[in-house]
Image: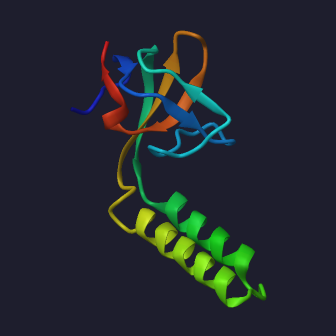
Amino acid sequence: MPYEIGAKVKLTRDVAVTADGRAAGPGSPGALSLATGLTGTVTGAAQDSGSAAEALRASFEEQLRGARLDSFAAGLVDGLRQRVIAATAPGTGTGTGYRVRFDNGFILDGLDESSLTPA
Protein backbone atom coordinates (compact mmCIF):
# COMPACT_ATOMS: atom_id res chain seq x y z
CA MET A 1 0.00 0.00 0.00
CA PRO A 2 1.51 3.37 -0.97
CA TYR A 3 1.91 5.87 1.86
CA GLU A 4 0.89 9.51 1.60
CA ILE A 5 3.09 12.30 2.93
CA GLY A 6 2.14 12.81 6.57
CA ALA A 7 1.16 9.17 7.16
CA LYS A 8 2.25 7.65 10.49
CA VAL A 9 4.29 4.48 9.93
CA LYS A 10 6.20 1.89 11.93
CA LEU A 11 9.24 -0.22 10.96
CA THR A 12 8.42 -3.89 10.37
CA ARG A 13 12.06 -5.02 10.60
CA ASP A 14 15.47 -3.72 11.65
CA VAL A 15 16.88 -1.46 8.91
CA ALA A 16 20.60 -0.92 8.39
CA VAL A 17 21.65 2.64 7.55
CA THR A 18 24.31 3.46 4.96
CA ALA A 19 26.95 6.16 5.38
CA ASP A 20 24.93 8.56 3.22
CA GLY A 21 21.82 8.26 5.44
CA ARG A 22 19.84 5.90 3.22
CA ALA A 23 18.24 2.60 4.11
CA ALA A 24 20.35 -0.39 3.15
CA GLY A 25 18.79 -3.50 1.64
CA PRO A 26 17.79 -6.52 3.71
CA GLY A 27 20.79 -8.39 5.03
CA SER A 28 23.17 -5.51 4.38
CA PRO A 29 25.65 -4.84 7.14
CA GLY A 30 25.75 -1.40 8.64
CA ALA A 31 27.32 0.31 11.61
CA LEU A 32 23.94 1.79 12.51
CA SER A 33 20.48 0.31 12.31
CA LEU A 34 17.00 1.37 13.32
CA ALA A 35 14.98 -1.16 15.32
CA THR A 36 11.71 -2.83 14.47
CA GLY A 37 8.72 -0.97 15.89
CA LEU A 38 10.19 2.53 15.65
CA THR A 39 7.46 4.97 14.57
CA GLY A 40 7.66 8.05 12.40
CA THR A 41 6.01 10.19 9.75
CA VAL A 42 6.42 9.93 5.98
CA THR A 43 7.91 13.22 4.73
CA GLY A 44 8.56 12.29 1.11
CA ALA A 45 8.46 9.61 -1.55
CA ALA A 46 10.27 9.07 -4.84
CA GLN A 47 10.43 6.45 -7.53
CA ASP A 48 13.75 4.62 -7.38
CA SER A 49 15.23 4.72 -10.85
CA GLY A 50 17.96 2.21 -10.15
CA SER A 51 20.74 4.82 -10.43
CA ALA A 52 22.09 3.74 -7.04
CA ALA A 53 22.42 0.19 -8.38
CA GLU A 54 24.30 1.44 -11.44
CA ALA A 55 26.63 3.45 -9.21
CA LEU A 56 27.33 0.36 -7.08
CA ARG A 57 28.19 -1.73 -10.13
CA ALA A 58 30.44 0.99 -11.53
CA SER A 59 32.21 1.43 -8.19
CA PHE A 60 32.84 -2.31 -7.92
CA GLU A 61 34.31 -2.48 -11.42
CA GLU A 62 36.44 0.64 -10.90
CA GLN A 63 37.96 -0.66 -7.68
CA LEU A 64 38.95 -3.97 -9.29
CA ARG A 65 40.04 -2.69 -12.70
CA GLY A 66 43.66 -3.53 -13.35
CA ALA A 67 44.04 -5.73 -10.27
CA ARG A 68 46.44 -8.63 -10.70
CA LEU A 69 44.94 -11.62 -8.91
CA ASP A 70 45.93 -15.26 -8.69
CA SER A 71 43.41 -17.81 -9.98
CA PHE A 72 41.82 -18.43 -6.56
CA ALA A 73 41.32 -14.71 -5.84
CA ALA A 74 40.08 -14.12 -9.40
CA GLY A 75 37.45 -16.83 -8.85
CA LEU A 76 36.33 -15.19 -5.60
CA VAL A 77 36.13 -11.77 -7.23
CA ASP A 78 34.18 -13.16 -10.17
CA GLY A 79 31.70 -14.73 -7.71
CA LEU A 80 31.33 -11.37 -5.95
CA ARG A 81 30.88 -9.61 -9.29
CA GLN A 82 28.05 -12.01 -10.20
CA ARG A 83 26.36 -11.38 -6.83
CA VAL A 84 26.61 -7.61 -7.27
CA ILE A 85 25.16 -7.85 -10.77
CA ALA A 86 22.31 -10.10 -9.58
CA ALA A 87 21.52 -7.88 -6.59
CA THR A 88 21.48 -4.71 -8.69
CA ALA A 89 19.78 -6.09 -11.80
CA PRO A 90 17.15 -3.87 -13.41
CA GLY A 91 13.83 -4.33 -11.64
CA THR A 92 15.30 -5.42 -8.30
CA GLY A 93 15.76 -1.91 -6.95
CA THR A 94 12.85 -0.18 -8.57
CA GLY A 95 9.85 0.97 -6.60
CA THR A 96 8.94 3.74 -4.25
CA GLY A 97 11.47 4.85 -1.68
CA TYR A 98 10.06 6.72 1.32
CA ARG A 99 11.70 9.38 3.47
CA VAL A 100 10.60 9.01 7.09
CA ARG A 101 11.24 11.30 10.05
CA PHE A 102 11.21 9.07 13.11
CA ASP A 103 9.98 10.13 16.54
CA ASN A 104 13.59 10.11 17.80
CA GLY A 105 14.46 12.80 15.21
CA PHE A 106 16.35 10.53 12.80
CA ILE A 107 15.46 11.00 9.12
CA LEU A 108 15.95 8.00 6.84
CA ASP A 109 15.58 8.08 3.07
CA GLY A 110 15.01 5.19 0.69
CA LEU A 111 12.80 2.93 2.81
CA ASP A 112 10.83 0.46 0.73
CA GLU A 113 7.21 -0.44 1.37
CA SER A 114 8.05 -3.83 2.84
CA SER A 115 9.89 -2.10 5.71
CA LEU A 116 6.85 -0.09 6.77
CA THR A 117 3.39 -0.66 8.19
CA PRO A 118 0.73 1.88 9.25
CA ALA A 119 1.21 3.01 12.85
Vertical position of residue 49 compared to residue 85: above or below: above
Foreground: 26 or 50?
A: 26
Write the residue at 50% across / 62% down: 53
Write the residue at 59% across / 43% down: 29
Of all residues, the one furthest to the front in this rendering is 72
Vertical position of residue 29 compared to residue 44: above or below: below
The figure's colour scheme reads rainbow
Foreground: 103 or 86?
A: 86
Q: How many marks?
A: 0
Q: Position of residue 112 (x, y in %)?
A: 38, 39
Relative to 119, is 69 on the left or the right?
A: right
Foreground: 63 or 102?
A: 63
Relative to 22, is 38 on the left or the right?
A: left
Write the residue at 48% across / 68% down: 83
The quadrant the C terminus occupies is top left
The quadrant the N terminus occupies is top left
